[in-house]
Amino acid sequence: MRKKAVLSAVLSLLLLGSFTACDSNTGSGEPNPQTQVQEVDGMKIYTPNSSNVKKLGRTYELEDSLWLTFSGSGAEFSFNGTKATVTIEGDDNAASADKDNQARVAIYLNGERVVDEMINQPSQKFEVLNTDTAQDCTVSIVKLSETAMSTVGISEIAVESDEGIKPTPAKDLFIEFIGDSITCGYGVDDEDKEHKFSTSTEDVTKAYAYKTAKALDADYSMVSISGYGIISGYSDGTKKVSSQTLPRYYKKLGFSYGSYKEQRPMEIDWDFGSYTPDLIVINLGTNDDSYTQNDTEKQQEYCDSYVKFLKTVRENNPDSKILCTLGVMGDRLFPMVEKAVSTYSEETGDKNISTMKFDPQDPADGYAADWHPTAATHDKAAAKLTEEIKSLLDLS
């Protein structure tokens, strides 16, 4: 079961609405001052925090905003009302002329995507609902693009509602996905293999991990960065790209070349008490394979480092099942994944871990940007992973 953040609420007699204390996941490392719910022109205005939204993935309360870093991070809430707006703040890439590195954000109303925008200004307000008749609503804010090139903050949620907003209930199942560009949904909206990277064509919701979470009605967290591996990032095969390794940032809020409110996510330690995954799916090795290729010594280095990473994951998630996968963009290193899991289990006695090989992408399903998986390939991968998880967790 997941650990729940401890919340407290203090009734105010001076202002409409409630004042709620945030959890320990704040910019200062200490509980934030109580956050006021204001009312302006009939709209209740909130700063998102644990008391009024369900956090999606790794997020961070920073200077009256909820900071979103990794793909799929966001917030979700419900309310009954007639109007709703969401204000998103960009990081220092937002005003950049390089549109390929701006954040892409989606907002859903009752499961329908009503906003899909690139964040190209310091602050942008989006209308989510405007109707004359009050209705029950669930609003989901999801960062579609990855952490390295773009981070954003949710600074304000405003609703016209008698009762205001509240977090949606936690799901019975929580899955963390650790991966690379495949998990991020790299290029999935651009089915031309000759095209290169752009945050505008990334959409984590069309990738296998997000699809698997939805199929299992699970809450999720993505810890993924394009081009990253266990021992090397994407390489020409001659030089190890040791700076682009996911284990370096696994215990951090994220990684980004930019900053938000003068802070960078790799400078902030992740609070592993924020949630406890029932299952952790690791899908790392595609970029390592570009470096190791058929070199057995390099492959063994990958295996040895994989074992070390498994120990780190287990140290921070003592009760989670772990499933190690590989294969969508090539399965040459999968035997080393199996060897790493076997070695890890022998060294630690931990049997709460298993492996699964994805089917390599089929040319008949096409290729997205930079030869990445198409939505059709992601659908197949999600279907296989979903069935594996059902069996692993004995889900009906």
Image (cartoon, rainbow, N blue to C red):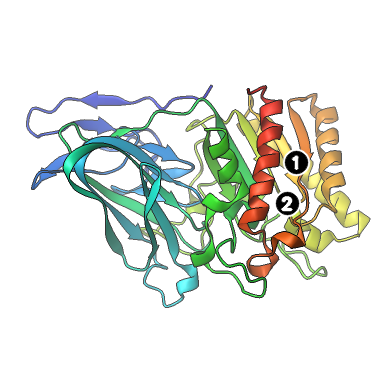
Q: On the image, which quarter does residue 255 sit in?
A: bottom right
Q: Tell whether 166 sits left or right of 324.
A: left
**Is 303 left or right of 384, judged from the image as shown?**
right
Q: Residue at x 78, y 48 (%)?
A: 359
How would you rate the neighbour count of disc 1 (Cα within 10 Å): few for under 14, some for 14-19, many for 20 or more?
A: some
| Image coords of residue 345 (percent x, y) | 81, 29
Frontmost of labels 2 and 1 is 2
Q: In this picture, is 112 found above or below 115?
A: above
The residue identified by callout 2 is 230
Q: Is residue 36 visible?
A: no
Residue at image position (59%, 51%) is 207
Q: Residue at x 19, y 43 (%)?
A: 82
Disc 1 element: helix
Q: Nearer the viewer, residue 46 or 107?
A: 107
The residue that appears at 85% across and 35% down in the rendered structure is 343
Q: As displayed, is residue 199 above or below residue 152? A: below
Q: Mark 2: which amino acid?
A: Ile
Q: Nearer the viewer, residue 305 or 326?
A: 326
First in sequence: mark 2 vs mark 1 = 2
The residue identified by callout 1 is 308
Residue 20 lies left or right of residue 278; in this view the side is left
Q: Position of residue 189 (x, y in %)?
A: 55, 63
Q: Quadrant of the C terminus?
A: top right
